[in-house]
Structure formats: structure tokens, C-alpha cells
Image (tube, grey):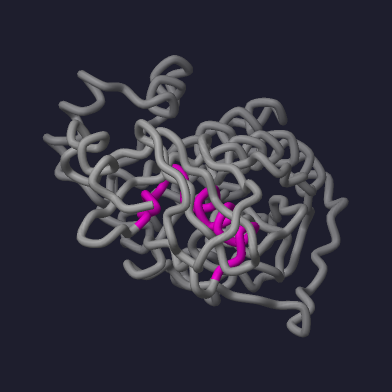
Amino acid sequence: MKVVILGKGSMLSNLIRGVMLANCEIAGVFRYERLKFHPLFLKLYDFFKSSPEYTLIKKHKFRDLSFKSANSEEFKRFLIKENVDIVIVGTWSEKLKKEIIDVPVIGTVNVHPSLLPKYRGPNPYLQTIWHGEEKSGVTFHLMTEKFDRGPILAQSEVEILSGDTGKELKNKTVFQARLLCSEVITKLGEGLVIPVPQDENQASYYENVKPEDMTLNFEKESSVELVRHIKAFHPWLPVYLECGNSFFIVNPYNVEIVDGTGKTGQIIAKDKASLTVATCDGKALKMDNLKLYRFPWLTDFIIKQLCV
């Protein structure tokens, strides 16, 4: 079978390896960066700071596709000319048109990092941790014109541990995507997969986070919710602790819930690059290795000025 892969980052590299495990021919790889960066800039970036996925493409001499869009006539003609059996999409912001989705002989498959129909939307890694889920996963489904809504081909669960940030969850998820990719492609080629429609009664959707979501809210979030908030946003966005006119970037690996009493949001202890703040549930949040936004070298000085 001939397969074309569209994607970005670690999801893309793992899907490439998954297709390789299935012993299928990779007719081309379309990197998301082709849509966002000028060709000259991307060429320089690839030369001086080659990404793992680009390194993989070059090592195995896969065709590094260059089109202005996945909806372009040029890309459509390429799929037809190559008689591509399957297109696999993982981490791609464009909404593919039906005329593109319908070109592959077997189908176009989207890879979504959640257990659909739950957590549709742009960043399930972040949202599942933020909402306190104990498990997430990856879903392979037939692509339709509606984001994340096509019939499900296969799913694999991933456990969310208490110490996981978005980074760890993503790493575990894309690895499962690699393993499941090989299985799905093999079964599709043998006609052994029966697509299952998604249950809309179980569906949930979350949009991109807003700028105000990057600041901790001690009045509305419990100590447990605050920790989830901090861990969920890493590594995509920093989370800030607001103290007076200062903003500190919170380290997701140096935060813990401790016993403490005080008015909600009150600083009850401080140390070098560390603050302990009372939470609304009678606990406190101890945050070490804080960095003052824009001026990290002033962190210790500013903390010394704060009242306890």
C-alpha cells in the first residue's frame, strides 16, 4: 500500500515509524511547517537545526512534499498520480476539503490525541489534565469535513499519572499512536476494520485557551485544581502567579500542596525563588524555582520585598 503522511512534530515522526512498522510504502511526507514558513527560512532551519522528523525523512529518503496547502490542486493531483491508498493526518490545522478526503483509494485517516468523542478540539493534552482526567488516549478515525467527528477505526488508552504535565502525556500518546498506526494500516489493507460512528451524546469540545487562562486564580481554583492548571499548560504556555504588580512564571515540576492557613491568595511563606500561597480550600501551594517574568535575575530581590 502507498501511504502519504501529513503532520507536525513528534506525532508526525511517530506516525512515520508506525507506517514503517506496517511495511507500507511512504509515498510522501507533508510537513506542517510548509504551510507556515517561507521556503528559504525553512531550508535554513532544516540545515542549521534539523528537527527529528525531518532527520527521519532524510535518513530514509522519503519524499519531502512541498505544497502551498493540503487543499491545493497540486496536492490533489499528486495523490491521484501516485494512486495513494491511505492519507494519514496527525497535528494539522487546515480543514481538508471533501474533494481531498475522498481521493485516497482506501481513505483519509485522522489521528486525534484523545478518546473521541471526548475532548475534541485543538489541545486535548492540555484539556484532559486540566479537567482532572485519569486517562486519555489516541483515536484513529476516518476524516470527514467536520473536525474530529468521523467514524472511529481504533483507540488506545493512556494513563495520566499525578506527576504528568502536558509534555509527558504527549510523549506517551504519540508513542501509542505509533503502535496503533501499524495495526490500523495493516487491518485497513486487509479489510478487517469496521468503522464505528461516534456517540454524540458523549461528545465534548474545548477551544484554545485564552490569555487570561495563563494566570492562576486562587479565588476560584482549589489547591488540586491549581496544580492541574500548572501541569496542563506545560510545555506550550507558561502559567503565571500574580503578586501585586509582579508576575512569576511557575515551574510545573516544582509545585506541591502543603498544609497552611491564611486568607485565600495570601503569601504565607517565602524563600529564595520560592513562595507558598494560601488556597481557597484551606491548603497552600508551595512553588519553588519561580522566575520573574521578563527579568528572571530580579526574582530573589522582588520576593524579598513581598509581605508574608
Front in this rendered view, residue 70 or 268 = 268
Q: Quadrant of residue 25?
A: top right
Location of residue 11 in the rendering, given as x and y in whole percent from the top left corner: 53, 40
Q: Is residue 276 above or below residue 141?
A: above
* Residue 108 in sight from this viewpoint: no
At x 50%, y 41%, the residue is 252
At x 56%, y 68%, the residue is 221
The answer to whether residue 23 is left or right of residue 264 is right
The answer to whether residue 135 is left or right of residue 261 is right
Q: Is residue 232 magenta-colored?
A: yes
Q: Is residue 246 above or below residue 152?
A: above
Location of residue 168 in the rendering, given as x and y in whole percent from the top left corner: 60, 37
In the rendered structure, which segment of residues is drawn in magenta? 221-241
The answer to whether residue 183 is left or right of residue 272 is right
Front in this rendered view, residue 200 or 163 = 163
Image quadrant in which the N terminus is located = top right
Front in this rendered view, residue 68 or 249 = 249
Q: Is residue 283 above or below residue 167?
A: below
Location of residue 282 in the rendering, given as x and y in whole percent from the top left corner: 64, 63
The answer to whether residue 192 is left or right of residue 39 is right
At x 19%, y 29%, the residue is 43
Q: Is residue 26 above or below residue 123?
A: above
